[in-house]
Image (tube, grey):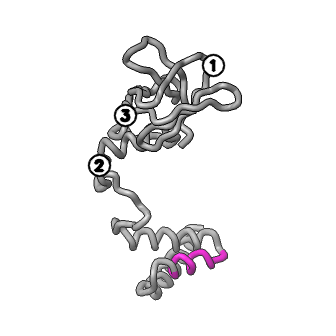
Amino acid sequence: MLKSSLLLFTVATIAFSAHANATIASQLSNCAAKQDKLERLICYDNLAHSIGNQPVAAKRNPVHEPVKTAAEKVDEFGNLKKPSKEEKLDTIHLIVKQVSKDPYGALKITFENGQIWKQTGTRRFKLEPQQKVFIKTAALSSFMLGTAERNSTIRVKRIK
């Protein structure tokens, strides 16, 4: 068993060396074409070892990603993707552009920055255009909308 594994390793190494000048894609194709599982694994291992620590284009390096501005963070607030710890924003302040109700009586609020939020609860809450409001994160990935003038909030979700 050990001799056959060593023999396969040697054959794979020689085969790999013969194709050293080929592109990585063609080398991957060569490895994938191997019928024997061990030989295929050895081929992949040798390919990975030959690449070493070269950067891969698809690999993202968060150290080199651009830092988002406050406006970009406000723009993304309420979207479903999980923000990183650096991007985390707990409260945003917006100005109401338009308020309407859906057929069930829930508020649909359009803000001056283009975001649209919808009330998810049934609590009555009066809003008017040009009114300043805040939206803050709440428990279980939910959001609460309120104003500085009153001590109550409504649960909302972002729809655009």
**Position of residue 130 measured from the top left corner of the image (x, y, whole percent):** 41, 31
Q: Residue at x 58, y 16 (%)?
A: 124
Q: Residue at x 43, y 11 (%)?
A: 151
Q: Mark 2 and mark 3: span between their CA atoms? A: 14 Å
Q: Amino acid at mark 3?
A: Leu
Number of dots carrying numbers:
3
Q: Which mark is residue 89?
A: 3
**Position of residue 40 measured from the top left corner of the image (x, y, whole percent):** 58, 72
2 or 3: tag closer to the N-terminus:
2
Q: Which mark is residue 67?
A: 2
3 or 1: tag closer to the N-terminus:
3
Lateral position of residue 34 relative to residue 91, left or right: right
Could you say which is closer to the camera, residue 63 or residue 150? 150
Secondary structure mainly formed by the magenta segment: helix
Q: Amino acid at mark 2?
A: Val
Magenta-drawn segment: 26-35
Say which element carries label 2.
loop
Lateral position of residue 32 relative to residue 55, left or right: right
Residue lying at the far top of the rendered structure: 151
Count residues near mark 3 (Cα–Cα under 10 Å), then give few for <14, some for 14-19, many for 20+.
some
Lateral position of residue 38 relative to residue 113, left or right: right
Q: Quadrant of residue 5?
A: bottom right
**Is 81 one of the magenta-colored residues?**
no
Q: Which residue is mark 1?
A: 122
Q: Which mark is residue 159?
A: none
**Position of residue 118 measured from the top left corner of the image (x, y, whole percent):** 57, 32
Say which element carries label 3.
loop
